[in-house]
Image (cartoon, rainbow, N blue to C red):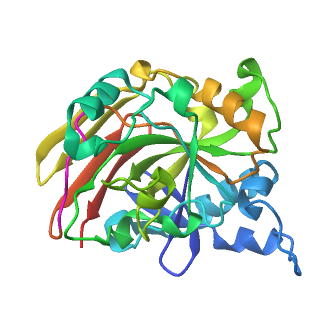
Amino acid sequence: MRICRFNDNRLGVVLGKHVHDVSAVLERLPTFRYPLPEHDPLMAALPELRTAMEELADRAEPLPLNSVNLLSPVASPRKIVAAPVNYRLHHEEALADENIHHGTNILPIDKAGLFLKATSALVGPSAGVEIRFPGERNDHEIELVAVIGRRADRVSRDEALSYIAGYAIGLDMTVRGTQERSMRKSCNSYAVLGPWMVTADEIPDPSNLEMELTVNGETRQKASTSYLLRDVATLIERASSFYTLMPGDLLYTGTPEGVAPVEAGDRIHARISGIGDMDVLVR
């Protein structure tokens, strides 16, 4: 199943080139009083709601995908976890290019560990990317994103994939500089997620997906998740050893080589096999 959010926080199921509005299922979600839950309510309830969503989709009038504004398919993640330099060739290009490393120590992922992006950076593809510091270098980074579906605390690698609700395409936009990653990658709109979430049952092997990113039609990044230094299951094992992952938390798994700057007016096209593709305008 392909699940999207669109327009004014509507919930949809994507079938072919159309969206089927299943927002009525949101009425079944529990209501909360302060304090708010530590998870995304829809992702937590998805296993129980899926049949109802399929039934609603069958009855809903199809809307052309190109007629709606696509939001982030996950509304309320409590954490955005990200993996730095998780492709060997990207690690090498970062070490070789002073405009990327800015004199900072680029450690391999096993030494650097993971980092967090602010949830306020999250947007859908239709919102686009707004360059926060036009005088600095702002790079694109395409990434496979895993969406956590249930509470994961110190889980083993062998069990890790069973905790995933689905997958989406991510853009981990980055301001180059000497600041900590969590700061340079947390500007508003610097965590793009979309175009929808494909449920995990449709992607049994996340370690064999092709990805490509173009800017204004020019290929910048092209690789496969088979080249991940630490695969999705290992990343979940590592992340959950430090903090509990909750339904709706996002795991950006790292970007391959080919990172490069973008500026206002550029159009990014990102594609990952098994998921789809999305266009993102830079403003």
Asked if residue 272 lies in the magenta stretch, the reply is: no
Q: Quadrant of the C terminus?
A: bottom left
Q: Position of residue 104 (x, y in %)?
A: 36, 42
- For the residue pair 66 and 72, the one nearer the viewer reads as 72
The residue positioned 49% from the left and 66% from the top of the image is: 121
Query: Vertical placement of 187 versus 142: above or below?
Result: below
Q: Left of 118 or right of it: where is 47?
A: right
Query: Vertical placement of 189 versus 210: above or below?
Result: below
Asked if residue 260 lies in the magenta stretch, the reply is: yes
The residue positioned 29% from the left and 34% from the top of the image is: 94
The residue positioned 38% from the left and 63% from the top of the image is: 125
Q: How many marks?
A: 0
Q: Position of residue 34 (x, y in %)?
A: 88, 80
Q: Position of residue 77 (x, y in %)?
A: 65, 60
Q: Left of 250 or right of it: where is 246?
A: right
Q: Main secondary structure of the magenta part?
A: loop
Instruction: Let me know if residue 230 appears in the view.
Output: yes
The residue positioned 36% from the left and 21% from the top of the image is: 88
Q: Which residues are magenta?
A: 257-263
Q: Position of residue 276 (x, y in %)?
A: 38, 44
Instruction: Let me know if residue 49 appears in the view.
Output: no
- For the residue pair 108 and 221, the one nearer the viewer reads as 108
Residue 60: name its quadrant. bottom right
Q: Left of 142 or right of it: where is 137?
A: left
